[in-house]
Amino acid sequence: MINFDEEIKRYKPCLEIDEAEQAIYDYEVKDVTDILNEMIKEFNKDNN
Amino acid sequence: MLCPKCGDNLLSDGYCNNCNIKVDIYKKILNTSKFLYNQGLELAQIRDLTNALNVLNQSIKYDKNNIDARNLLGLIYFEIGETVQAIRHWVISKNLKPTDNIANEYLNIIQNNHSNLNKLNTAIKKYNQSLNYIHQKSEDLAIIQLKKVVSINPKFIKAYCLLALCYIKSEQKSKAIKYLQKVLKIDNNNYIAKKYLDLIDREEKEESLDDNIVQSETNNYNPIRTTSSFQQLLFIFAGLILGLAVSLFLIIPSKVKAKNNEIDKLNSELEIIKEQLSEQTNLYNTELNKNKELTNKYNELEQEYNYYYDVTNELKDIIKAKDYYERGDLANATDQLILVNKSTLENTEFYSWYNELNDNVALDNYNLGMNYYWRYTRTYYLKAIEQFDKCLKLKDHTDALFFRGISYYNIGEYGKAAEDFNDLIQKYPDSKRSESAKWYINQISSYLD
């Protein structure tokens, strides 16, 4: 049996076209290589 | 050789001084990203869009500069109705690689077709509105909105799934199945659609299983065999009694209850209609009262207008009379003043002014009458009578009445003389002329005898 109230919680509102600009600015463009670089910098800092 | 990350020169062993990392690691990461992109592409080609999205998102997590993965991601998002997500990825792709990039083409297509963009935006707004309706427990309104959404954007998967969920809740499973199948046509591995279909299928199986159990249980019952006609009659009679009992105790009460419920419903509807009728009646009465008030106000204003109209007319006559009087034309001044209806002016500020003029004109008429009276000829008595008449038309004047009576007496008009003297005696019994008037009346009586 489908629990309607629980199922509805999974549905979030969609972004509207007017909100696209903000959505682009808020988008975090980071990948694994950026994370790796940050980790290396942290590591080097701790060692120094 | 240059570092693929920062573009700096690499050392001979493949180490980048700037990033402090061996370039082989970068190459592995980039290859992973490409590998995931290829997987995503294969999945997209067979319309397994859900898994394609997952894989492509991972691809750009490994390498954010993987333009192909990003463009394909945007395309898939656009295909499933997530327009803003699509635009986001294409814009980022365009920023990372401004030239020779298919994302430019996609963005131009969307931006140049304003009406289509508006339609897509409308679909998103209505989808969000329908979510609000559901949170407000108005699933019926949500269904109406969602049907509009899918008619505007027939690829909006989220809307289809939500619509199907609403239909499932309202026990319209066949409609839910219809929309879920549409979802699977677009995205053949959409897990939400599959989950709902699976649950519907299981429920239907459970229901049919219950039916089967009932069916199989009834097969265990054998029919009763009768041995003699008497027993048959007995069984028939028992059956009739049982049937009657069932109808008396089960069917009829439930029917009566149903009818009572119907009556209650109609009664409550009747109450609502009565309330509405009462409201309408009150409104009507209020409007009627307002109308009456306005009518009364109108009548008042009309009366006021008529009154001031009359006053104005009287004032015109008075002004004419004053004008004649100032020019010495006593006759015309008198005639104008005789026309004035003094009761109209009684409560106005013009009354005293009118009275003053009236008194002056009346006195002048009396004085002229007395001038004629002292001539002692018939002709002048007649002229005196005329003047005294005018004076008395303007105001009550004891002497004018008395001398008119004497004038009538002197020309032999005893009847008219007697009238004037009697009038004087009645109106002014205490005046100095009343004794003389009584004497004249006695004289006239002796003449008439």
Image (tube, coloured by chain):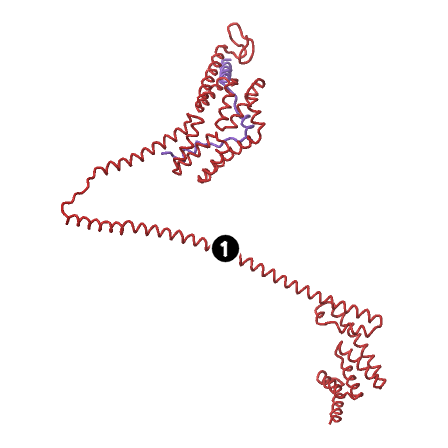
Chain colours: A purple, B red
- Nearest to the observer: residue B106 or residue B131: B106
Residue density around tag 1, few if under 14, some if 14–19, many if 20 or more, within 10 Å: few
Left or right of B335 in this view: B65: left
Left or right of B381 in this view: B226: left
The residue lying furthest to the right in this view is: B375
Please give the name of the residue rendered at 45% of the width and 24% of the height, measured from the top-left corner: B49
Examine the rendered structure and indicate whether residue B133 appears above or below residue B318. Answer: above
Question: Which image quadrant: the N terminus of chain B?
Answer: top right
The location of residue B128, given as percent across then percent down, is: 49, 34
Q: Which residue is mark 1?
A: B279
Examine the rendered structure and indicate whether residue B261 appears above or below residue B394. Answer: above
Element at label 1: helix
Chain ID for label 1? B
Examine the rendered structure and indicate whether residue B248 appears above or below residue B90. Answer: below
Left or right of B404 in this view: A16: left
- Nearest to the observer: residue B237 or residue B251: B237
The residue lying furthest to the top in this view is: B12
Examine the image and state in which quarter residue B378 appears. bottom right
Q: How many marks?
A: 1
Residue type marked 1: Glu
The location of residue A26, given as percent across then percent down, is: 53, 26
The location of residue B113, given as percent across then percent down, is: 57, 29
Question: Which image quadrant: the C terminus of chain B?
Answer: bottom right
